[in-house]
Amino acid sequence: MPKGIEIREAHFPGRAPIDAYGNGGFRFADMSHRGSILMLPSGVYGWDVAEGDPLAVEKFYRVIDEAKDIEVLLVGTGKDIRPLPADLKAALRAVNVSSDPMSTGAAVRTYNVMLAESRAVAVALIAV
């Protein structure tokens, strides 16, 4: 007997450049995702953060868990640049991850360049 619709946590197991962004989501690897995303060495994950939400350390635990494989975390903060809270910057620094906040568009472009250069980069992108 067929099962009903199964809802799973959004996850793409791989690294892929971002093909497009806007209208509340992102396109990558011939797929699309509505909402914010984390692109980490282990893959792409749906991220429960919207523009204007606090950038709390708890929202970055997955990044911290994978810190050994990340040198730079780009944070796309939405349409406008927002500074990262001091406690978040300290938590990332404690695991040797450099962080750089910028608009989501700038973060997408920078991520694609750094990924093409095979750099140890990750990105947290708030959908615009």
Image (spheres, rainbow, N blue to C red):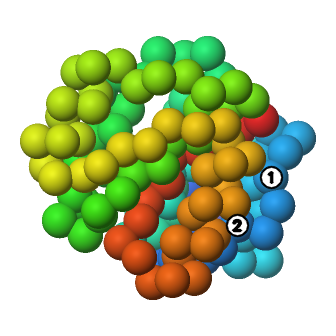
| Quadrant location of the N terminus in the rendered image | bottom right
Please say if 103 is above or below 4. Answer: above
Q: Toward which corner of the image does residue 58 lie, by quadrant? A: top left
Q: Are marks 2 and 1 in contact (CB under 8 Å)?
A: yes
Is residue 120 visible in this depiction of the protein? yes
Residue 74, position as x, y percentages in the image: 48, 49
Residue 43, position as x, y percentages in the image: 46, 69
Residue situated furthest left in the rendering? 94
Where is mark 1, residue-wise?
Answer: 21
Looking at the rendered structure, the secondary structure element under dot 2 is strand
Q: In the image, is 47 to the left or to the right of 23?
A: left
- Residue at image position (42%, 65%) is 121
Identity of the amino acid at label 2? Ile
- Residue at image position (51%, 83%) is 117
**126 vs 118, nearest the viewer:** 118
**97 vs 24, nearest the viewer:** 97
Identity of the amino acid at label 1? Tyr
Q: Residues within 10 Å of mark 2 (few under 14, many from 20)?
A: some
Give how far apart the Cα atoms at labels 2 and 1 are. Answer: 8 Å
Residue 71, position as x, y percentages in the image: 29, 62
Where is mark 2, residue-wise?
Answer: 18
Q: In the image, is 61 to the left or to the right of 20?
A: left
Please say if 6 is above or below 42. Answer: above
Q: Toward which corner of the image does residue 109 lie, by quadrant? A: bottom right
Q: In the image, is 13 to the left or to the right of 128?
A: left
- Residue at image position (13%, 49%) is 95
- Residue at image position (27%, 20%) is 86
Q: Residues within 10 Å of mark 1 (few under 14, many from 20)?
A: some
